[in-house]
Structures are given as C-alpha cells and as structure tokens.
Image: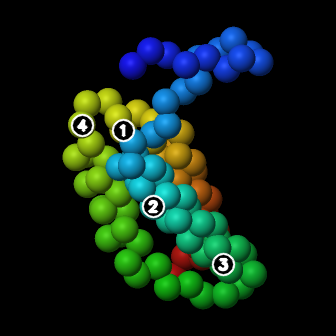
Amino acid sequence: MPKRYSPAENQPIPEPPSLEVAATLAAIDSLQGTLTMARALVLAGREVDLAGLDREAARLCAAVACMPGDSGQALLPSLIGLAYELDALSVCIPEP
C-alpha cells in the first residue's frame, strides 16, 4: 500500500494501529486510570483494594508477548506511562 501524505504538512500519515494493538492500548489506558484513581484515594487517606491488578497486568503482558513481529513497539510509550503510574502509587501506599 503506498504511503499517504498529509496535504497541509507534506508528512506521511501514520497507519492506524491494528485492532489488536488498539484493544491492548485501551486495556493499558484502563489499568492506568485504575492506578491513578487508587493513588488519588490513597492520597486522600482512603484504603484501596488492589486485588486483581496482578491478574490484569499478567493479561497485558501476555497480550503484548503474543503480538506478531514488532507490532508491540507501538505500545511502548503507554507501557512506560503505566509503569510510572504504578511507581507513583507504590510511593503513596503507607507501609503496614
């Protein structure tokens, strides 16, 4: 398929992500939202139940590992953001 160019910028228009990549990006965004909400609750002094986050993270890892070729490369920025959010949450959780 020939490359398409944006008429205004004369730059190649990136191909849209595959359905598999788009679905995985949505799952990453959802998990990141959950972590962000959990961090906000912890900062407000509330207790949070993090049960199930490990399973969701394992599902994401499996989905990325099963992607063909280098299609998972498109997920790298979102996965890095997810890791940062997890680190931010872990800093906020008080020691037992």
Kind of element beneath mark 3: helix
- State the residue position of label 2: 27
Rounded to the nearest angstrom, the CA distance separating label 3 from label 1 is 32 Å
Q: Which mark is residue 72?
A: 1
**Nearer the N terminus, badge 2 or badge 1?**
2
What separation in Å lies between label 3 and label 4 (alpha carbons)? 38 Å
Kindly report which numbered mark, 2 or 3, lies closer to the viewer in this rendering: 2
- The disc labelled 2 sits on which kind of residue? Ala
Name the residue: 30% across, 62% down: 58
Look at label 3 and name its amino acid. Val
Name the residue: 68% across, 80% down.
Answer: 41
Disc number at residue 53?
none
Residue type, label 1: Gly
What residue is pinned by disc 4?
Answer: 68
Q: Earlier in the sequence, mark 2 or mark 3?
A: 2
Task: Name the element at disc 4.
Answer: loop
